[in-house]
Image (cartoon, helix red, strand yellow):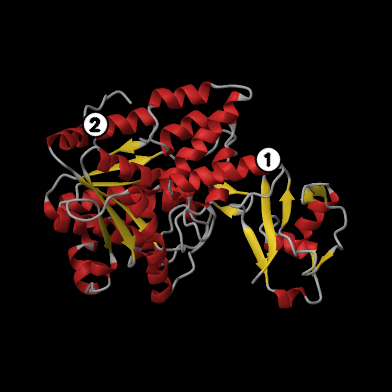
Amino acid sequence: MTYQPKSDFLSVMTERGFVADCTDLQGLDEALMAGPVTAYIGYDATAKSLHVGHLLNIMMLRWLQKTGHRPITLMGGGTTKVGDPSFRADERPLLGPEQIAANIAAMQGVFAKYLAYGGDGALMLDNAEWLDGLNYLAFLRDIGRHFSVNRMLSFDSVKSRLDREQSLSFLEFNYMILQAYDFLELNRREGCALQMGGSDQWGNIVNGVDLTRRVLGREVYGLTTPLLTTSDGRKMGKSQGGAVWLNADLLSPYEFWQFWRNTTDADVGRFARLFTELPVAECDRLGALEGSEINDAKVILADEVTALCHGRAAAEAARTTAREVFEKGGTGSELPTLALPRAELADGISIVQVIVRAGLAGSGKEAKRLISEGGARMNDAPLTDPGLILDAAALADPVKLSAGRKRHALVTVAG
């Protein structure tokens, strides 16, 4: 990047490593310096929770507000009914309106941890407000005429699907038009001048910039973050147990903390820049540590990221539990807990089933392999018998199950 931003927001974004592409970096910088800018990121309601893969862009919105601008979190109550085809191998399952509404309600609480809503603060809007009532013929005439199919086919998000000769439905093909229309509508309603998102959204964002310029004659901007992978090339945000959810009811604060504590050494400094508010110099210092000291840096990283998402008290409780489990051999009160109904234990339950239900293995086959390879422990003692049966008496006191050295769960009797 040759241009050096002068605005607070873009200076922070550049220094901390958030910027991949911008439609007009200098123009956006000048707009940010001229006065408060309203910017948005869209979130389709495809699941009951956001996950770590969304966290980079949520932090972007947080920094936007901290530097004096207004963020909009746009919930995709309308676009979720279509489904974003970007870089997907197949069509997304279509959700009904009740499931979409439930997902939006479950997602909204996360944003309140990072952004200040109300008054002149952040806005939370739903694109169903303007998409649900569209007149199809009027929309084609007024909006569709601004889109070139030739150009739409050239975008990587579509081209990659077609190059692999995978079907792209007409429904999905409309998605980029709807997202572009979101930007136009937000500019018209709220004066929104910037759309942000991941680099996989570049084509959709550029369409919105072009459409707003054509229809309203206004200059607006697009800014994307880089595709985030770990230093060993894995997609950011996946753990052995699946997605790393931001909602505490889907992933406990302890498991969330542990995900960050297990960061690869080479990623500590970079992740501190992106996912915490520690000064850049401190992030660099932490990333440069070696040997046993890098583990202390990982604890700081886990503390800071967890404090933002779940609160400082939850971060401290997770750290205390980790210390009890790893250093003192205890059980730790914050460990994920599986409570088995007493009636279910009348005839006993196999240890293999318990390991799977506790989230320590993805299948019975995986649980058996874990036991046979010496990776499973019960109350810190090796588990060697995959045929072991547990009953209510065996669970009179909570039992700690472990998969390897870093994944643990408590098993108790419900009630």
How many numbered discs sit on the rendered protein? 2
Which callout, 1 or 2, points at the residue further toward the start of the chain? 2
The answer to whether 276 is drawn above or below residue 392 in the figure is: above
Indicate the amino acid at tag 1: Phe
The answer to whether 46 is drawn above or below residue 187 in the figure is: below
Label 1: element kind: helix
Q: Residue furthest front?
A: 397
Indicate the amino acid at tag 2: Asp
Could you tell me which residue is drawn at 35 percent across and 48 percent down?
114
The C terminus: image quadrant: bottom right
- Contact between labelled residues 2 and 1, with CB atoms less than 8 Å apart: no
In front of the other: 341 or 368? 341
Q: Position of residue 185 (x, y in %)?
A: 20, 59
The answer to whether 78 is drawn above or below residue 266 in the figure is: below
Could you tell me which residue is drawn at 43 percent across and 72 percent down?
99
The N terminus: image quadrant: top left
Disc 1: CA contacts within 10 A as few (<14), some (14-19) or many (>=20) = few
Q: Position of residue 341 (x, y in %)?
A: 68, 73
Foreground mark, 1 or 2, reads 1
The answer to whether 350 is drawn above or below residue 346 in the figure is: above
Label 2: element kind: helix
Residue 198 visible to an observer of this rendering = no
Residue 344 as seen in the image, left or right of residue 144: right
Residue 389 as seen in the image, left or right of residue 133: right
Q: Which labelled disc corresponds to residue 326? A: 1
Disc 2: CA contacts within 10 A as few (<14), some (14-19) or many (>=20) = some
In front of the other: 23 or 10? 10
Which residue was labeled with disc 2?
A: 8
Q: Position of residue 186 (x, y in %)?
A: 20, 56
Q: Position of residue 172 (x, y in %)?
A: 40, 64
Q: Which labelled disc corresponds to residue 304? A: none
Residue 308 visible to an observer of this rendering = yes
